[in-house]
Image (cartoon, rainbow, N blue to C red):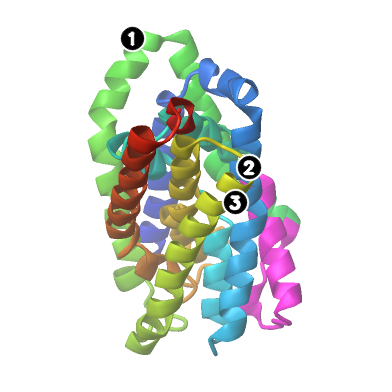
Amino acid sequence: MEVFFDNALLVAYAGVMVLLGLSLEISDFRNIFRQPKAVLTGLVCQMLMLPALAFLLVSIFPLPDHLKTGFILLSACPGGSTSNLASYMLRGNVALSVSMTALNSFLVVFSVPLVLALGAWLMGMKSGDARVPFGETMINILLLVVLPCAAGILIRAKWSPQARKMEGIFKYIMPVLLAAAIVGVAFVGKSEGPGVKIADYLDALLPALLLNITSMVAGYFISRLVGLSLRDRFTIGIEVGIQNAALAITIASGALFFNNPQIAVPAIVYLLFPFFTALIFGYLANRRELRHSLFHKPDETR
């Protein structure tokens, strides 16, 4: 049963990445060069500021190594299609959101092992729970994330009508299969090794909420400091604040990586918050945009 759920998790996540690739077009990558300042600001927030916040939080809270590792891992997994959907629903800059997702889908092969290695070194974590082989991790992420996503992009570019049909069919099926595999790995399949305790979930609750809120707010205000429009600030806040918890859970629990569901606890707990905090953040940001459109010069909200 354990082997079944491990393999199912990896296959399901690879399928989700193919699905993400099917939703992307070459023009999404061209958009990176059309708004380089916004994309670069978002990437700096995701790749540097977010891990720094995670390092700070795990330094403040007295957490065991496996939870520290889980938070550092979560901070290294940038938002995927979920943040794109949130930007669309909350009237953000969808082109910017999709451009960042497209770029992150390829950068993650470097960012995850780098942030994990840096985090283990800075936190002085020596246990096996805190470390995975750097080169092997890069290769496995390449196989799990980059190649399936690239395959989806290629299918979309070569056979666009068929790709749209496939996307329409699988956009509901794959997330359900991934969720089922995550539940199986985290709560059913691990009959051996360390078990997840209720105390782990309780310990991760407040740091997970703080990571979500502070990263969202910090992304917004850093974007404001560099002079981005209100809509772009809001979008970057969403992108930075909504992490790819599914990828973090897959790396934590999957047989190719840590193979330890304890490390997945921060990402599992984190899943409780982004939907609600994004709604509140969107409401506040859109109220601010409305005020600016009424009382300030028109180009402020572009």
In depth, the one of 282 and 167 nearer the eye is 282
Q: Quadrant of the C terminus?
A: top left
Does residue 35 appear left or right of residue 232 in this picture? Answer: right
Q: Which residue is mark 1?
A: 161
Q: Mark 2 and mark 3: span between their CA atoms?
A: 8 Å
- Say above or below: 180 vs 84: below
Marks 1 and 3, how far apart in space? 40 Å
Say whether disc 2 or disc 1 marks the residue closer to the N-terminus. Answer: 2
83 or 106: nearer the viewer: 83
Does residue 254 appear left or right of residue 206 in this picture? right
Q: Depth check: give the residue in front, 191 or 172.
A: 172
Picture quarter containing residue 271? bottom left
Q: Residues within 10 Å of mark 2 (few under 14, many from 20)?
A: some
284 shown above or below 37: below
218 displayed left or right of 124: left
Element class at badge 3: helix
Q: Main secondary structure of the magenta part?
A: helix
Label 3 belongs to which residue?
A: 222
